[in-house]
Image (cartoon, rainbow, N blue to C red):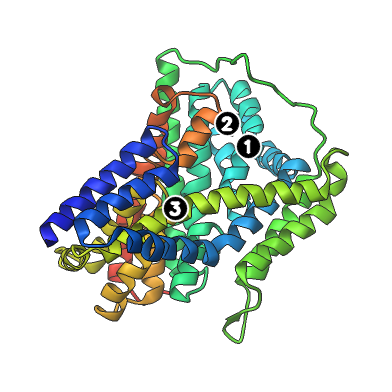
Amino acid sequence: MEIVSIIGMIAALCLLSFLVMKGVNIFIAAIASTFVVALTGGVGLYDALQTNYMGGFTGFFGSNFLIFVAGALMGQVYEKTNGAKAIARLIISKLGKGAAMIAVPLAIGILTYGGIAGFVVCFAVFPIALEVYREADIPRRFIPGVIVFACCTFSGIGPGNPQVGNVVLQNAFGTSLMAGAAVGFICTGVTLVVGLVTLNIMVKRAWANGEHFIVKPTDTFDDGAVCPNGWYALIPLAFSLLLINVKIGGRQICPTAFGVAIGAALAYVMLHKYKKPQDKAIDMAGNGIKNAVSAAANTSAVVGFGSVVKAAVGFPVLCSAIENIPGPPLVAVALATTILAGICGSGSGGLGIAAPILKPIFVDGMGININVLHRMMLIASSGLDSLPHNGFVVTVINGVCGETHKDAYMPIFWLTVVTPLIATAVGVVLFTLFPSLP
């Protein structure tokens, strides 16, 4: 029965990936895959849906919904007040448009590291990237890769950031956002440097092949947008990061979601005069919550599927196989996390599934430091999650940038799959050699 269950799990995971890549609604894809796991894994269909699936769904949604809301509200404020544009233009002006390949990723990364949800940043910053890449004559097809790279890799794995993946592990493990900080910062730097070097090589090859920036009929350039001072716009982001990472007596003084929400409120107070008159505060809040509900529910749908997998009779066999992967234990942690993130098409969704599975094996069973597990899993989750079926990848390529997978996905692959895998290998080596670093 265990063999049939394992085959069913593999088939279900393949079905989930296939359906999502074909554009099937994530809820339909997850429930269809749940049926396969239940039928082959000795789990009653009703129990699989009502108890296991909905238990995982509501558990993840309830634990993480507030951070989705806070990040979306912060994003709404910075988008509608042109605060995001102001910060992007500040970074670009300081580095110069000749350094567009460095300036644009850094600008986006600062916004996401500060707490603005990636699914909002991409809409706010795309017009700026368009302006800068046109002036630098960088082929337009690289913009999606730069946006996904900056939103989902170095800014998402860095210690202290309030993005969903870091918060998921904070809630699951009882750790802090700064867990595994020393190696975490090194891996963040490795991801950024390797990514920028890779981008530079790809763009130079494109130029050598005669590629240039070509304006699409849908492109608009808002060069005259009235923006606040960039340094002024950075204050709420810096305040929010400080608020959620400062501890008194070893305890976080402000819960992460509340700290980001306070930063959003401060940003509105400081920047509201730059918004358009028709952008009412109540409408901005409503749009932010609507976006947060959609993003949280989509991720929870996949976590619910993972909860059914955990109930299947073949699951303990898979756990035993993970536990016995040869080599340092963190190799198994990295492999399990990045594979689950790839299957789910979501780093945070993969972490939501992997956290309760891996903690008993590696912390309770093998004695790995919980802070090491937190940071290692977060770093590993940033690789295979951005395969072609990832919802954010699809949104950025098709919805925001108006490109096709054929033209735009290869830069995304090198920047957001290969580069994070290199950082994951660095993390495994450093955490294995120096497990006691803070």
Q: Secondary structure at mark 3?
A: helix
> Please, which residue is most extreme toward the bottom here?
249
185 and 410: which one is in front?
410
Residue located beneath label 3 in the image: 301
Q: Amino acid at mark 2?
A: Val
Residue 173 visible? The answer is yes
Label 2 close to label 3 by CB (< 8 Å): no
Residue 420 visible? The answer is no
Q: Is residue 43 above or below residue 194?
A: below
CA distance separating discs 3 and 1: 24 Å
Q: Tell us which disc is closer to us: 2 or 3.
A: 3
Residue located beneath label 2 in the image: 400
Residue displayed at 69% across by 53% down? 73
Residue displayed at 62% across by 72% down? 255
Residue 361 rendering spot, x and y as whole percentages: 26, 73
User: Left of 68 or right of it: where is 196?
Assistant: left
